[in-house]
Amino acid sequence: MKKKTHFLMILLLGIWTLDTLFISTGLENMNQIFLLCFKTICSLPVLIIFLTLKEGFHLPSKKGLPLLFLSSILGNILYFYFEYTAFKYLPISIASLMLGLMPALSYLADSLILHQRLSLKIFIMILFSLFGLTLVLYDGDPLDTGTMIGYISCFICVIIWIIYGNVLQHLNKYDDSTTITLYESLIASIIMLPLALSYKPEVLSFHDLYGSIILMGILSTGFGYLIEVKGLIDLGTTISGIYVNFLPVSTAIIGFLFLHESLTILQIIGALIVIISGLFVIIWNE
């Protein structure tokens, strides 16, 4: 089971990388909530078909409904809203790198919540992660208002990810990952739709409609979210976070090739420190 989930998470890494490119370009013409809402709506047919084929269409457990609404707001709305905001104000390589702190901080949060003894060597790696991120930010662009909004959005994402992963662990006692994914997306779409319509752009380009919304809605928000929820449930927040840890590498390549982004030598060193220390957190935690 875990081997299959790891393979799916590798596939998800590729989908995420492609998605960051479409998000970065799509947000030039669309509001975050508009893009997020209609990508989520496009994912619903995929999720309905998958659930029907897997185990037959059915409603979620009544006992898990409060947790389901909470996870929808956390995982489908707040997390992605702040992630899109980060991609709007920061280079995608920098935003992805900051999100790469998830493995280290997830382990720290799990240790505090579960009252487990914190390993000294893992704690040192967490400090190295923070040091690496400091190098990246120190050698970055001037801290104007937009840049600060991007940084703050990234840190909020990390906090939401940790809370969301723990909510999913409890929700999985009532429903399977496919059911959770479908109804999270449905609830989130209903909540976001009125606000999204108020931010409707006057004109949608072919790229925005068929690329950023429909294609990425099916691939990233549909199939991708199925994989993400399965990974969080089967592997936990810390292990799943390792794949987020690799995202800065792939997004840096995408950013360099298609968006003309680049990193300084000091930022590259800091990025390597964040990624490698995150890997050690995963390996030693296993």
Image (tube, rainbow, N blue to C red):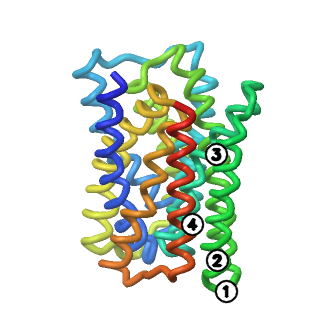
Circle nearer the N terminus (2, 4): 4
Q: Name the residue under label 2.
A: 147
On screen, 162 above or below 201? Answer: above
How crowded pointer 1 is (Cα within 10 Å; few <14, some 14-19, many 20+) is rated as few
In the image, 165 versus 77, the foreground residue is 165
Give neighbour class at mark 2: few <14, some 14-19, many 20+ (Cα, 10 Å): some
Query: In the image as oriented, which residue stretches furthest toward the front?
Result: 121
Amino acid bearing label 1: Pro
The reply to whether dot 2 and dot 3 touch (C-beta < 8 Å) is no
On the image, numbered disc 3 is attached to which residue?
Answer: 160
Which residue is the site of mark 1? 142
Residue of label 4: 86
Circle nearer the viewer, 1 or 4? 1
Q: Are marks 2 and 1 in contact (CB under 8 Å)?
A: yes
Give the Cα distance between marks 2 and 3. Answer: 20 Å
Badge number at residue 115: none
Q: Height in image: 278 above or below 35?
A: above
Mark 3, Cα crowd under 10 Å, few <14 / some 14-19 / many 20+, is some
**Reading the chain from its start, which is encountered first: label 1 or label 4?**
4
Identify the image quadrant of the N terminus.
Answer: top left
Pick the residue in front: 28 or 138. 138
Disc 1 to disc 3: CB gap under 8 Å: no
- Residue drawn at x 56%, y 59% is 274
Q: Which of marks 3 and 4 is nearer the N terminus?
A: 4
Foreground residue among 255 and 197? 255
Mark 2 to mark 1 CA distance (whole Å): 8 Å
Report the residue at 56% width, 28% height from top.
Answer: 168
